Image (cartoon, rainbow, N blue to C red):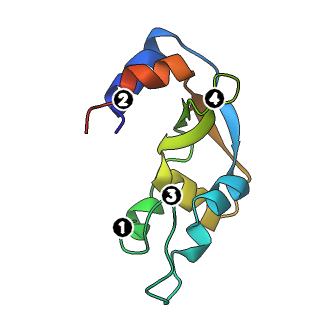
Amino acid sequence: MFDINAALALIAAAPRAPQPLNVTAWANAYGLRHLDNPNPWATNLIGPTNNSLNRAYAMTADLTTPVIVCQIPITEQQPAPLLIDGTHRLYRAWREQVPQLPAHLLTPAETQQIKTPR
């Protein structure tokens, strides 16, 4: 749905300081605590499923690389944030109880620019 390379190009073209991302809040929102639930009916509405996240790889992810959060327009006044790059980093930070990760926040206009056709 989103072109991460295009997002990185936008960030490079318009540099911005990374913002702190609250790991616990985002891990809860992404349902990371449900990943190891043995109940096959337990699922996340957003975020990875229990068999789609490579946990071994996640534990090697570089926590200094900013994750990317876009803003999906819900209304003109209040877009909704969505993590589009960095789920493995979020998982590792959550497991290691790291309180914050650096994050690049795209504007709603930038988000529109990186959308890819389905």
Where residue 111 appears, as percent x and y from the top left, is 47, 25
Q: Secondary structure at mark 1?
A: loop
- Taking the spot 66% from the left edge, 62% from the top edge, the residue there is 28
2 or 4: tag closer to the N-terminus: 4
Tell me the residue at 26%/33% (across/down): 117
Which badge, 3 or 2, comes first in the chain's sequence? 3
Would you name the residue on which mark 2 appears?
115
Q: Specify the label residue 52 is tagged with.
A: 1
Q: Amino acid at mark 1?
A: Ser
> Mark 4 packing: few (<14 Cα in 10 Å), some, or many (20+)?
few
Q: Nearest to the eye among marks 3 and 1: give it.
A: 3
Give the class, few, some or many, for how many residues have Cα within 10 Å of label 2's Cα (few <14, many ≥20): some
* In the foreground, 92 or 7: 7
* Mark number, residue 46: 3
Measured as percent of width and height from the top left, residue 105 is found at: 59, 28
Q: Distance from label 1 to label 2 (Cα)? A: 22 Å
